[in-house]
């Protein structure tokens, strides 16, 4: 199986974006939603994105 560097992984980048969104919630960034709702949205979107990316992944990371 071919491999790619970690920074070429869409899954890792999606998780880093979700991490940044979670940190923004913790830091108090106001987007007009309660922190609980923001966290739920991030979790739901991340779960869906991870499922899709797992289905389309063809290369391992090294």
Image (cartoon, grey):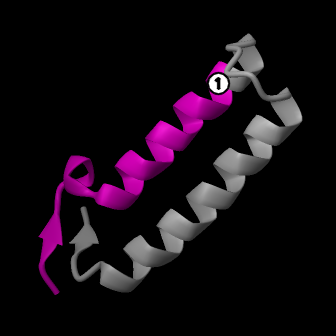
Residue 55 in which image quadrant: bottom left
1 sits to left or right of 37: left
At x 31%, y 81%, the residue is 56
Q: Nearer the viewer, residue 7 or 1?
A: 7
- Residue 25: give x, y in percent of width and height: 72, 24
- Residue 35: give x, y in percent of width and height: 83, 28
Q: Is residue 25 above or below residue 37?
A: above
Quarter holding the C terminus is: bottom left
Q: Is residue 18 above or below residue 29?
A: below
Q: Which residues are magenta?
A: 1-24
Quarter holding the N terminus is: bottom left
Q: Is residue 7 magenta?
A: yes
Looking at the rendered structure, the secondary structure element under dot 1 is: helix
Q: Is residue 11 magenta?
A: yes
- Residue 13: give x, y in percent of width and height: 36, 47
Q: Is residue 37 above or below residue 20?
A: below
- Residue 9: give x, y in percent of width and height: 27, 58
At x 42%, y 50%, the residue is 14
Q: Is residue 40 above or below residue 44?
A: above
Q: Nearer the viewer, residue 33 or 57?
A: 33
At x 67%, y 14%, the residue is 29
Q: Nearer the viewer, residue 27 or 60?
A: 27
At x 65%, y 46%, the residue is 42
């Amino acid at each position: 199986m071919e491999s790619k560097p970690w920074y070429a992984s869409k899954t890792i980048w999606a998780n880093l974006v979700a991490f940044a969104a979670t940190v923004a919630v913790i830091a108090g960034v106001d987007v007009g939603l309660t922190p609980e709702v923001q966290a739920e949205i991030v979790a739901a979107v991340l779960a869906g994105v991870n499922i899709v990316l797992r289905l389309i992944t063809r290369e391992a990371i090294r």
